[in-house]
Amino acid sequence: MIAIRMTRHGAKKRPFFHIVVADSRSPRDGRFIEKLGTYNPLLPRDHAQRLTLDKERIAHWLKVGAQPSDRVAKFLSQAELMKPRERREQTKKSAPRAKAQERMKAEAAAAAAAEPATEAAAT
C-alpha cells in the first residue's frame, strides 16, 4: 500500500518534517517515492512556510490510491484537497467510574439544594 506520511528531520528538540509518498512497509525516515511538501511546527500558525504542499502531485497520488496518515489527512482537508475525516470517539478511560459519577451527582444536587437555603437566609 502507498502512504502519504511525514518523515522527521531536524535536530533534537527542533523537529522539521517532510511530507512524502512511501511504501507503507518502508521505515518512517527511510526510503520514499516522492517528496510532496514540508511541515515546520516551530513556526507560527499563520506563517506561510509552516506548511508547504505540492497540490498537483498530492491530487495525483490521492487519485492513484495513496492513503494519507491521520495528521497529513488533516493538513490536506485544511488545504481543501480532500474532505475531512470523521472524528473518532474518544476513549472513556479517563472519565470517573460509575460510583464516582453517582457521588458527584449527589454532591451537585446537595449543593444546589443548599444554595436556595443560603439565599433565603441572606435576605
Image (spheres, rainbow, N blue to C red):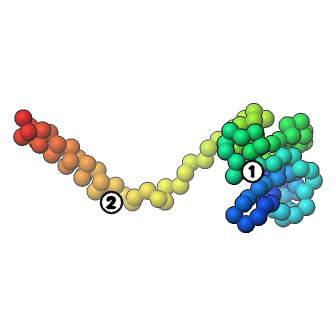
Residue to which mark 2 is pinned? 99
Q: Residue at x 89, y 50 (%)?
A: 35
Q: Residues within 10 Å of mark 1 (few under 14, many from 20)?
A: some
Where disc 1 sits, the SS reads loop
Give x and y (percent) for residue 21.
87, 51
Residue to which mark 1 is pinned? 40
Q: In the rendered structure, find residue 69 and report the number of the disc placed on it.
A: none
The N terminus - image quarter: bottom right
Which three-letter amino acid code belongs to the residue tagged 2? Lys
Is any atom of residue 9 visible in this view?
yes
Which three-letter amino acid code belongs to the residue tagged 1? Asn
Q: Residue at x 69, y 64 (%)?
A: 13
Query: 121 or 44: which is nearer to us?
Result: 44
The C terminus - image quarter: top left
Where disc 2 sits, the SS reads helix
Give x and y (percent) for residue 66.
85, 46
